[in-house]
Image: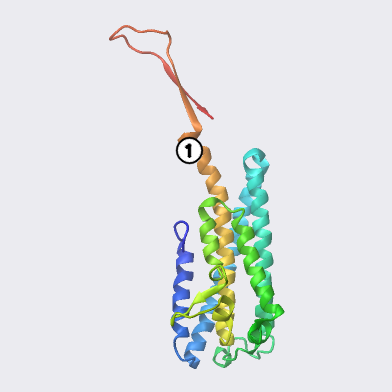
Amino acid sequence: MAGGKETPRQKMINLMYLIFIAMLALNMSKEVLAAFGIMNEKLEASNEKMVDSNENYLASLETKASEDAEKYAELYANAQRIKEMSSDYYNYLDGLKTEMMAGTEDPKDYAVMDKSDYLDGLFFQGDNLAEGGKEFMKRMNDYRTQVAAIVPAGIKSSVEARFETGDQNGKVEKRDGSTQDWINYNYEGFPQVASLAKLTALQADVKSTEESALKAMLEGELSSQVSLKNFATDLIGSKSAYYSGEKYDGKIIISKT
């Protein structure tokens, strides 16, 4: 992933993406469908664990803002906006998953989740996007651009990469060299359980984005405060001139700029 060192959690998600792509190249046997389901469970469990961690980062920023508004008030305000946008997008994706699974008798019987009817009907209308598909793309693009606009510069590129939707025309290149709309390439005709795992993976990206933004805001300002660039030194002697070999008895004063 572009933009900074990857966390162990992000490395895990990236590895799961690679496994996901490899599975798509296989025939959709019951074993492969079950593997998608297990992947989805692991991602959902990981997402749940992120909740407390992100809340702690936000609470720390709130405390810092109350103690030093000049340095932290704007950061905390941006953190709240990121939290709000992340929650809104995450809940939208959660709603899609709930609706997609509504007619499923056993939510863990992954071997029978081989149909693509729900998202195909929601996202696509012939060769065009249905209203549901347009909303899906708008939500993703809005989240990417709005969050990237206020996160620390060091992680902006990683936010854009996580939620990229193809080239400037929304196209991706296929293995045969032809191009296809990003949403068709990623969601049209896929088994229900594969789409479920993809939506959960998007939620994982939301949680990772929220974490990296809040962490960078908090740790970035703390690092800035202790940086040697923010201190000035003055050398003060007891007199203005000294003879050669005479002992110097001055003092150094360090002040924060």
Residue where numbered disc 1 is placed: 227
Label 1 secondary element = loop
Asked whether, in this view, residue 239 is left or right of residue 127, the answer is: left
Label 1 CA crowd tier, 10 Å (few <14, some 14–19, many 20+): few
Residue 140, percent from left and from top:
63, 68
Q: Residue at x 47, y 57 (%)?
A: 3
Image quadrant holding the C terminus, namely: top right
The foreground one among 169 and 121 is 169
* Above or below 25: residue 50: above
Q: Residue at x 48, y 27 (%)?
A: 232
* Amino acid tagged 1: Ser
Asked whether, in this view, residue 250 is left or right of residue 165, the answer is: left
Q: Residue at x 45, y 66 (%)?
A: 11
The foreground one among 146 and 230 is 146
* Above or below 246: residue 155: below
Q: Residue furthest right?
A: 131
Which of the 4 image quarters holds residue 40? bottom right
* Above or below 56: residue 112: below
Residue 256, percent from left and from top:
53, 30
The number of callouts visible is 1
Residue 249, percent from left and from top:
38, 13
